[in-house]
Image: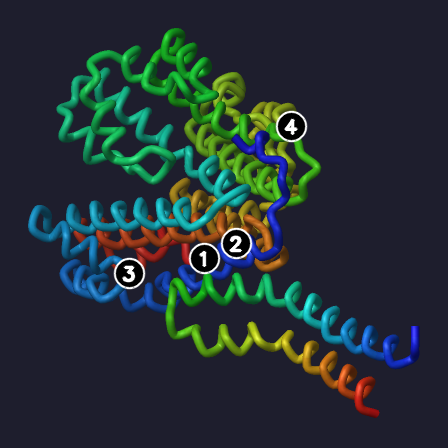
Amino acid sequence: MPIEGMVAVGAGLAVGLAGIGAGLGEQGIGAAAVGAMAEDPTFFGRGLLMTVIPETIVIFGLVVAFLLMFM
Amino acid sequence: MLRKIIRKPRAAEWAYIVARVRVMKRKLIPKDEYNKLLNMDLNEIIRYLEESEYKNEINELAIRYSGVELLDYALYLNLTRTYRKLVRISKGLPREMIVDYLRKWDFWNLKNIIRGKMFGFPKEEIEKTLVPAGEFDEEFWKMLLARESVEDIIKEFAKKPYYPILEELARACPISEFEDRLDKFYYTSLASIHSDNIDIMYFVDFIRMEIDIKNVKTLLRLKLEGASPEEIAAKIIPKGYQLSESELRKLAAMDYEDMLKNLENYWFSEAVKQIKDQPLSKIEVFFDKVWAKRVLSRANHFPLSILPVLAFILMKKIEVDNLRIIARGKAEGMSAEEIKEQLVVV
């Protein structure tokens, strides 16, 4: 496989695996946030914030993918 | 029953029910508010509760009842609805555990109906004592009330796994023994569950600790009443957490002072150290406090488990009991200090 192909696979893996990791992290937080909001809607803001915190991992993955593709 | 459930719940399932329960627990009356309540009269207490989680129940029942009676019914109606909500919002293993634990209310209702029928109480009087917080709803219990004989009542449980035990107890035992043996059956059946699933182990340990507290309270009460070791042994519930049946028999045979000294070696020693020369009512409060503290601390240690849910179930019952004690105390004209001594505030 040419080197460009390997880079593309690496970039895909960086985003994909980061996405799976974030998803695994979010499942518990999301469930807890929905539970708390069901009892008290004022938890919406905090719940949303906590739920998206693992998303930062995907941003790292995306940055790595960009670096691989365009550097 | 729990044994049937094999699949281990995912962390997300615990997170959902525990988060809901934690928010519900925040809505319980805070510790400091009890001091305020103690300084109010009965009408002020009712007004205070009208602005709390008990609002709907008080408004619903205010047409039919007033004073202490209104509070009694409103508090129990709220307790029932809260417990039924827990069953409704949970699923899988957490739900099975909650239903199994709340079955104590099914047995409570069954005992009340059978006792009421045996002593010829009118249906309305028996109905007032019912708390449909377990597996069966109000309609089921009303249907049971319409049954004439104890056999017919027991037959309604024919599809339940515990039916053979109920049938045997109802056939063979007088009413007082029936009640004791039903309690023993409830606790031992839950405490005997064997599983290497850690979630179930937490639940079983909780039940076994509750057995310890029940046993030690029975032991102290009967000792103070001067019961014989044999009478005490007959009331012991087996399968405690630290207090085994044989240890309890030994303790029952000791004199009161030696027994207290020996009881200091168990997990509830904090309560035992306070009981010297205290009346029985206070002693029971010490143990209830130690039990509540232990349950809360274990719930904090194991947050993604059934323990926070069980802690909430216990704390809700304690709150209802505290409010009833305050209301009854106020109605009887007791002083704030006297009432405070009876409250379980942790």
Which numbered disc covers residue B247? 4
Which numbered disc flags the more N-terminal residue, 4 or 3? 3
Q: Earlier in the sequence, mark 4 or mark 2?
A: 4
Q: Is residue B177 visible?
A: no
* Distance from the alpha carbon under mark 3 to that under mark 2: 20 Å
Same chain, labels 1 and 4: yes
Q: Mark 4 packing: few (<14 Cα in 10 Å), some, or many (20+)?
A: few
Label for residue B53?
3
> Which chain letter goes with mark 3?
B
Give neighbour class at mark 3: few <14, some 14-19, many 20+ (Cα, 10 Å).
Answer: some
Image x and y of residue B41, in percent: 17, 62
Q: Give the residue drawn at x 64%, y 74%.
A: A54
Farthest-out residue, bottom: A71
User: Tags 4 and 2 in contact by the CB under 8 Å rule?
Assistant: no
Q: In the image, which disc is placed on residue B21? A: 1
Q: Are marks 1 and 2 in contact (CB under 8 Å)?
A: yes
Mark 1 burial class by Cα count in 10 Å: few <14, some 14-19, many 20+? many
Q: Which residue is mark 2?
A: B308
Do the CB atoms of the residues marked 4 and 3 lie less than 8 Å apart? no
Label 4: state its secondary structure.
helix
